[in-house]
Structures are given as C-alpha cells and as structure tokens.
Amino acid sequence: MKNTASRDLTRSFLIIFIVLLIDQVLKIWVKTNMTIGEEIPVIGHWFNLLFVENNGMAFGWLDGGGMKLFLSLFRVVAVVALFVVLFRLARKNTKFGVLFGISLIIAGAIGNIIDSVFYGVCFSESTFSQVATWFPDGGGYAGWLHGRVVDMLYFPLIDVARADAPSWLPNFFFGPDDHFIFFRPIFNFADSAITFGVFYMLIFQWKWLKTL
C-alpha cells in the first residue's frame, strides 16, 4: 500500500511540475517579449496571444484592487490545504483519477501564486510601449505578494460587429467596442489547469465527490 501511495504521489508531483513549467515558460516569454495589449495571431483569427495583466482571479475576473494581499494569501492557504488533501488521499489508496484532478488544480493555483508573490519584485513594469526586464536597477514594479497575474490566451471564436449581428441579440452581449465576442475572457495556462481539473472532477469523479 505504501508503494502504491508513493507511486501515485510521484505521478501527481510530475503533473504539477509539467503544468508549472509550461505555465511559467509561457508567462516569462510573454512578459519579456510583449507589451501590454500586444496581440500575436497563433491560429487564424480564433486563437491569439494577447498580453494583459490582472490583480484578480482566474480569467481576469474579480479584479483584486485593495484586496490584492488577501487574494494572494488566500491562494497560498488554499494550496496548502489541497496538498494536505492530496497526501491523505494518496495514503488511503484513492484511485489516481481523483489525485489527477486535484493535482491539476494545485498546479494551476501555484502557477498564479508565483506571479503574485514574485513577479512584482523580479520584473519592471510592463507598459503599452515597453516590455518588462528582469531585476531592474530601481527595483520591481510592486512588493512581495502584490505582483500581477500574466494572462495571454485569447480565443475570439465568434467576433461579430453590432451592425452585422441579429437584431434580437441583447445589448449586454456587446462590449465597449460594439462587438459580440465569444470567448472574450483572456486567461493563462494555470487558469486552464484549474478549470479542466474542476470540470474533470465534476464530470468523471462525481461518485467520489458524493462521499465527501
């Protein structure tokens, strides 16, 4: 049983490491090669890299503002709690599918924690005209736990101007640019891991969730 728990934990940590590696490599590349608002087409018109930063939570929702420190600390506490759950479930020989989902959520949370904790200290300010640099002489753009989360994945699968849209489409679907865009939120790889992990648990591990 100990060997099974050890094997499953090793696989879980490998998943966390791979997600974090992809997330941070992409964020650092964007931070040091793109200006705020810069957009790079990746696949046609429906998948672009669009560099934005936010103080809030996943997909840029709930901008942190004065709650930035609280949000950063909340993420840290949540990750510690999830690690405790992961270890306990592994020792109980819970099936690996459950550990897989939790590992994705942990990895995504850590990915955004790294931005919040370190990026403000390690990088200069990203602006609309200048890319960020590592460890600037005057110090970073913010203190510990006050860094902004880097987002860049943008999937405008549908982009219709108000003039070309059906008349029955409600006005609240249109943004300030008078376009209806689906999918409008801009997010990062860590957000994707959290979202996938949550839906994976709800869809494929719902029987286990019922035992909680």
Image (spheres, rainbow, N blue to C red):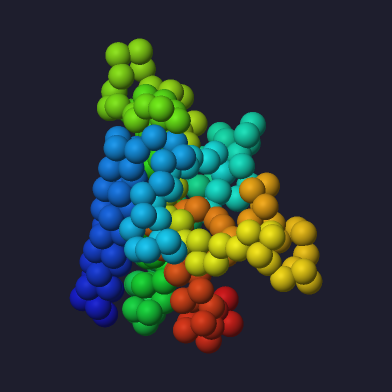
Q: In this view, does 77 lie above or below 3?
A: above
Quarter residue 8 falls in: bottom left
x%, y% of residue 30? Answer: 33, 42
The reply, left or right, for residue 33 in relation to residue 211 is: left
Q: In which quarter of the image is the N terminus?
A: bottom left
Q: Quadrant of the C terminus?
A: bottom right
* Residue shown at 42% from the left, 61% from the top: 45
* Residue shown at 46% from the left, 40% from the top: 37
The reply, left or right, for residue 198 in relation to residue 61 is: left
Q: Looking at this view, is 17 or 64 the one in front?
A: 64
Q: Looking at this view, is 7 or 128 the one in front?
A: 128
Q: Which residue lies furthest to the top in this view?
A: 138
Quarter residue 90 falls in: bottom left
x%, y% of residue 3? Answer: 21, 76
Q: Is residue 116 above or below residue 85?
A: above
The reply, left or right, for residue 210 in relation to residue 129 is: right
x%, y% of residue 180? Answer: 64, 60
Q: Residue furthest front?
A: 163
Q: Is residue 139 above or below residue 130?
A: above
x%, y% of residue 205? Answer: 48, 82
Q: How many numbered discs?
A: 0
Camera sees residue 8: yes
